[in-house]
Amino acid sequence: MANFKEQLSRYPAVEDLARRAKKRLPHVAWEYLDMGTGSGAGVRRNRDGLDAINFLPRFMRGVQEQALKTTLMGHQYEAPFGIAPVGLTGLMWPRTEIILAQTAAKYRIPYTLSTVATQTPEAVGPHVGEMGWFQLYPPRKPEIRADVLKRAKDSGFHTLVITADVPAPSRRERATRAGLSMPPRITPQFVWSGITHPAWTIATLREGLPTLRTVHKYAGTGSIKHVSSFVNQNFGGTLDWHYLKEVRDLWDGPFVIKGILHPDDAEEAIKVGVDGIQVSNHGARQLDGTPAAIGALPALVERINGRAAVIFDSGVRSGLDIIRALALGADFVMLGRPFIYGVSAFGNTGGDHTAEILTADLKSNMAQLGVQTIEEVKGLTPA
Ligand SMILES: Cc1cc2nc3c(=O)[nH]c(=O)nc-3n(C[C@H](O)[C@H](O)[C@H](O)COP(=O)(O)O)c2cc1C
């Protein structure tokens, strides 16, 4: 698009980016990005839960100016939101991780790189500056674990996120139905999809088919097929409180457990010494039968009671949603799909586009509510 300003005014909401992404992506990539699991009711429930939280605005407060700066676990961010980890990112758009790392550095918001992203910590680190978080899917072998953590640290990632809510792969029927497999099966439909989505195809041919590059070193090969089965055999399925404690002791820096919904799990995590708890149902991609993540938030905030930072994700699509989560007690909010919709829709400028939408919407809704700071947002009581 000719210029960024025009792009922003023609696509002013995350749903506009999603609509454009759907057109630009081959069916299988769109389905992988957008789906939940099971019937998809969990995805709708996340939205319904957020939409149900509303406020009585206060007026007559004179000239106001909104400030978004936030401190979280000892680090300063320009806004109270950031980018959640997304695996197999290059399937949606090549080099998505680099594009989003640059967005994070520019807007001074955190970017979380997934263990199963398609770029390595070494490749992303120089772009993310001081905004890097690294998400660990737990390797089974201690020597692989130590090496992955060292690579993340040496590449400048200061905050470690360990994901608790993938005890096993989920079924994700939409992706299966669409023919998602690693390596991609070159069927007539796949070829047709390539022909009918030329921007994606050209970008992908230039970069090469997506593969889980961080893992190549341990799998001993770059063959997509071998790397995928290596990940299935060597990552995940091991996590317990003892493992969490071992990682806590290995990581010198802020440590977050992601995917917590039950207050008793939060209690255990605090005993281990986490700095943050990311309340999330993985965007309803693991268990279709959880409550809306936002519905689970108040009980967790009450139990955590200031003993760890509370980070929220799942279903957030706007600045107003960020306000909703902060008002219910979150200290910070992360978003997964909205940033990938942005990059899928607009390539290099897509991450900035999502950040601009969220920043403008956050400021606008704070003004409508008569609040100026994130502390004041946290003090709001839903009507
Ligand atoms: C395509 C996709 C891939 C994801 N991969 C990961 C991952 O590798 N690690 C992880 O902890 N969470 C992963 N998630 C979950 C996100 O980090 C986040 O919890 C979720 O997207 C939040 O919901 P939202 O997309 O509605 O914002 C993934 C989500 C999506 C949409």
Image (cartoon, rainbow, N blue to C red):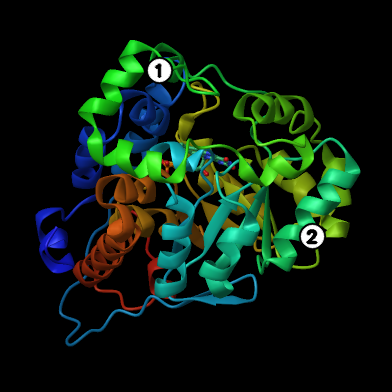
Badge count: 2
Is residue 167 in view from this perspective? no
Which residue is at 67% across, 23% downward?
168
Tag 2 secondary structure: helix
Pick the residue in front: 20 or 304: 20
- Residue sitting at the far bottom: 63
Earlier sequence position, callout 2 versus callout 1? 2
- Residue drawn 37% across and 51% down? 339
Name the kind of residue labelled 2 in the image. Lys
**Can the viewer see residue 196 in this picture?**
yes
Q: Label 1: which residue?
A: 174
**Left-right relation of 174 to 248:** left
Up/down of 15 relative to 67, above or below: above
How far from the left and from the top, in percent, is residue 244? 82, 46
- Are there few (<14), some (14-19), or many (20+) residues within 10 Å of tag 1? many
Residue 350 image position (x, y, % from top left): 30, 56
User: Which of the 4 image quarters holds residue 56?
Assistant: bottom left
Q: Which residue is mark 2?
A: 150
